[in-house]
Image: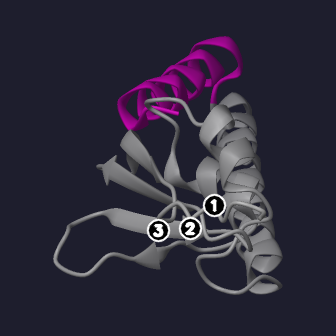
Amino acid sequence: MNPVLGWTLALMALAAGWLGYGWPGVAMAVTVIAFWLILQFNRAVRVMRNANDTPVGHVVSVVMLNSKLKVGMPMLQVVGMTRSLGKKVAGRAETYLWTDAGGLELVVTFDNGRCKRWQLNRPEQMEVREAA
C-alpha cells in the first residue's frame, strides 16, 4: 500500500473516531491501526520464514517466475512468489538474480522496492551433434 494513502486512512480513522465517539472512538481507531500494522508485520515475517528454507537465488522455474512478474510489484511479493531471496548483482543497485536447475537466470531490477524491469537469460545453446 502507498504510505501516503495508509497514513491518510489512519488519520481519517482517528478523526472519525473522535467525531463519532470521542476518546473511546480514538481508542478504537488506534486499536484497528495497531492490528493492521501487526498483520502487515506478520505477513513480512512469514515471507522471510518461507524464504529461509530455500537457497539464496534459487527458484523451481525461472520461466514460471518470468510469466508471473509485473511492473510495480513490491519486492515482498516477488520474494513470496520465489520463496527465496534473490542473489544481489554486484555493482548494480536494487538488482537481484534468481536461477533454476536448468541454468536459466532471471535478473530483476527494483526501483524503491518495486519491480521496474526484468530480463530472462538463457544459457548458451549446446551444440547439437548429428547422428551418423
Q: Which residues are magenta?
A: 1-22
Q: In the image, is residue 82 above or below residue 2? A: below
Count of numbered marks: 3
The residue labelled by disc 1 is 128
- Which x, y percent locates residue 44? 68, 63
Q: Choose top left, top right, bottom left or bottom right for residue 66.
A: top right
Compute the Cα span from label 3 to label 2. Answer: 4 Å
Of residues 106 and 79, the one nearer the viewer is: 106
Nearest the eye: 126 or 104: 126
Residue 38 can be seen, yes or no: no
Please report contact status of discs 3 and 2: CB closer than 8 Å, yes or no.
yes
Question: Which sits earlier in the primary sequence, circle 1 or circle 2?
Answer: 2
Q: Marks 1 and 2: CB-CB under 8 Å? A: no
Residue 42 vs residue 78: left or right? right
> Which image quadrant: the C terminus?
bottom right
Residue type of the residue flagged with mark 1: Val
Q: Are marks 3 and 1 in contact (CB under 8 Å)?
A: no
Residue carrying label 3: 97
Image location (x, y in percent) of residue 14: 55, 29
Task: Estimate the x, y position of residue 41 in percent, counting from the top left.
Answer: 68, 62
Category of crowding for the residue at label 3, using alpha-carbon neighbours closer than 10 angstroms: few (below 14), some (14–19), many (at least 20): many
Q: Which residue is mark 2?
A: 98
